[in-house]
Amino acid sequence: MFTGIIETLGSVQKIEQENNNVHISIKSTITSELKIDQSVAHNGVCLTVVAIEDDIYTVTAIQETLDKTNLYTLKIGDSINLERAMKLGNRLDGHIVQGHVDQTATCIGKNSQNGSHIFTFNYDLSKNNITIEKGSITINGVSLTVVNSQRDSFSVAIIPYTIENTTFQDIQINNTVNLEFDVIGKYVARLIQQ
């Protein structure tokens, strides 16, 4: 379980294909605090640490993960949002995030507005996910509030701190991002469909 509050950025050091799996090695300031078998969210995708060497650790993404996330777009040198699983008893500063990406979206708008930044994303409605005005959404692992919720798109307002400390600084028009919709909203939507 995660909160969507990014701890730090990592840097992709190595990408290695093995059959349908991809091993991703990441350099990070939190590597020394990690252990084998630990869950870490990478751009919102929960992956297990499988190896650690000095300040670099490795995780493995299977085909299912690669098909449903933007991890397949990673290149050596790319930055990646990192968050370790939350500790029981800590404050829940973001919202409940499972680290299970529901689908991807495309950035279709990026505007500055007097100190904040508005990003707009379009997503495929056939996956039956929805956003609601002022509801929670996780984009590349970042817990955010939906503004301007539309049928197949939505926007989020980003403060300068979030731009500077997450991969939002790298997101451009037409980039693909990972979305995890609000878990409570997903259960409510499922109940209404039945």
Image (cartoon, helix red, strand yellow):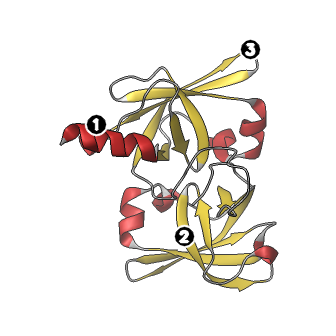
- Residue 161: name its quadrant: top right
Spatial separation of the CA atoms under disc 2 and disc 1: 26 Å
Which amino acid does the dot numbered 3 rest on?
Asn
For the residue pair 20 and 5, the one nearer the viewer reads as 5
Instruction: Using the rendered view, name the quadrant where residue 39 is placed.
Output: bottom right
Residue at which label 3 appears: 114
Tag 2 near tag 3, CB within 8 Å: no
* Kind of residue at badge 2: Leu
Q: How many marks?
A: 3
The answer to whether residue 164 is seen in the rendering is yes
Q: Which labelled disc corresponds to residue 125?
A: 1
Tell me: 62 left or right of 97.
Answer: left
Q: Is residue 59 above or below residue 111?
A: below
Labelled disc at residue 74: none
Residue found at the very far front of the displayed protein: 89
First along the sequence among labels 2 and 1:
2
Name the residue at 38% across, 57% down.
68
Is the residue 82 above or below the residue 50 in the image? Answer: above
Q: Quadrant of the N terminus?
A: bottom right
User: Residue at 44% across / 47% down in the picture?
Assistant: 183
Instruction: Mark 3 and mark 1 in contact? Answer it, CB < 8 Å.
Output: no
Q: Which residue is mark 2?
A: 47
Q: How much space separates mark 2 and mark 3, taking CA atoms?
A: 37 Å
Q: Residues within 10 Å of mark 1 (few under 14, many from 20)?
A: few
Q: Is residue 52 above or below residue 136?
A: below
Q: Is residue 128 visible?
A: no
Q: Secondary structure at mark 2?
A: strand
The amino acid sitting under disc 1 is Leu
